[in-house]
Image: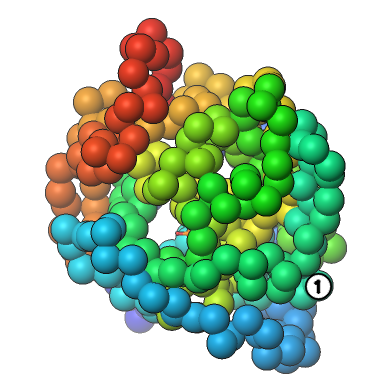
Amino acid sequence: MNIIRRRGWEMPESLATPEHLFFNRRALLGAAAGAAAAGLVPGHAFAQRLTDQPDPSMDLYPGKRNEKYTLDRPVTDEKINGNYNNFYEFNSSKQVAKQAQALKIRPWTIKIDGMVEKPFEIGIDDLVRKFPIEERLYRHRCVEAWSMAVPWSGFPMAKLVELAKPLSSATYVRMETFLDKSIAPGQKQSWFPWPYVEGLTVKEATNELTFLATGAYGKPIAKQHGAPIRLAVPWKYGFKHIKSIVRVSFTDKQPRSYWQDLQDSEYGFWANVNPEVPHPRWSQANEELIGLGERRPTLLFNGYGEFVADLYKGMEKERLWA
Ligand SMILES: Nc1nc2c(c(=O)[nH]1)N[C@H]1C(S)=C(S)[C@@H](COP(=O)(O)O)O[C@H]1N2
Ligand SMILES: [Mo]
């Protein structure tokens, strides 16, 4: 007999409320096509893994822990975190880790352009050695009402902004994920607005909390978490935490993100965590702590108000919370 067991934190489908809309016909058709394509990929992913070189940045991790950022819950078990991910480029289920191994993370170049003194490109191994790597324990709150606690390693985004030398007229940063259908089957689904794009104001990007994670759990960041470099903005919903970044552009126009493009009425630009403002389809009042089988009330700004509340003073009329 085939008994399907659910662990406590694996919510039934009806509660899991995936980010994208199942009643959207294009997405519905897409989910079916994606599942079919998924069957073909693990072999490919495995072959890629066998040919991977040892990570050349291994010696940098975990970096000295920055004790300023503390948790109110235990760090999520690495195995649990590494097997419950969101990475639509590979597939739109949480079981994406295996397929994500197809991502090729060397060579990896990040383009810095737009309103900067001089556009340039930089290889990931040059970038990670420009600044001291530190470790920070951050909470992560997905818009789907689950959360984790993660030991990221990396450097503040403010350092990258400084390196980029934006013009004083640049007010926003737009970030882009890789685009390569040959390794990422999700990107063959043309009704999704690839590549994945996210944005911040330059003020947000240079806030002390805003972090570029190149490592996690004391080593180079795993592919399913967005290797070799992803964003961590712990006061915002998880979808702002763009993975596998290849381009950082400075602009004076508010960037339109992947999720806004997909469903503007549900996913706004600011996306700050607020337990009192429900998502149009579910409450944000509390969250499932993945791996702990526990639900807890969600905190305003995910508990990071002391660092970021000032950023939003006088913006009460804006849609700050969805
Ligand atoms: N490029 C890209 N970045 C992404 C996503 C994605 O699908 N593609 N999903 C986002 C969402 S919704 C969440 S909750 C987090 C999940 O990060 P994790 O898998 O490391 O927990 O990544 C975010 N960044
Ligand atoms: Mo998410």
The mark total stands at 1
In the figure, is residue 237 to the left or right of 222?
A: left
Q: Which residue is mark 1?
A: 107
Quadrant (top left/top right/bottom left/bottom right) for the N terminus: bottom left
Q: How far across and down, in percent of the image, does residue 260 sit?
A: 58, 28
Kindly tell me whether residue 56 is visible in this rendering: yes
Q: Quadrant of residue 262?
A: top right
Q: Amino acid at mark 1?
A: Pro
Q: Quadrant of residue 284?
A: top left
**Residue displayed at 62% across by 47% down:** 162
Q: How far across and down, in percent of the image, does residue 207 sit?
A: 44, 41
In the image as oriented, which residue stretches furthest toward the top? 317
**Residue displayed at 33% across by 58% down:** 138
In the figure, is residue 166 to the left or right of 70?
A: right
Q: Nearer the viewer, residue 283 or 166?
A: 166
Q: How far across and down, in percent of the image, does residue 271 sit?
A: 43, 31
**Residue displayed at 48% across by 35% down:** 204
Q: Nearer the viewer, residue 190 or 202?
A: 202
> Against 300, is 50 above or below?
below
Q: How far across and down, in percent of the image, does residue 26 sit?
A: 68, 33
Kindly tell me whether residue 142 is visible in this rendering: no
**Residue displayed at 66% across by 84% down:** 55
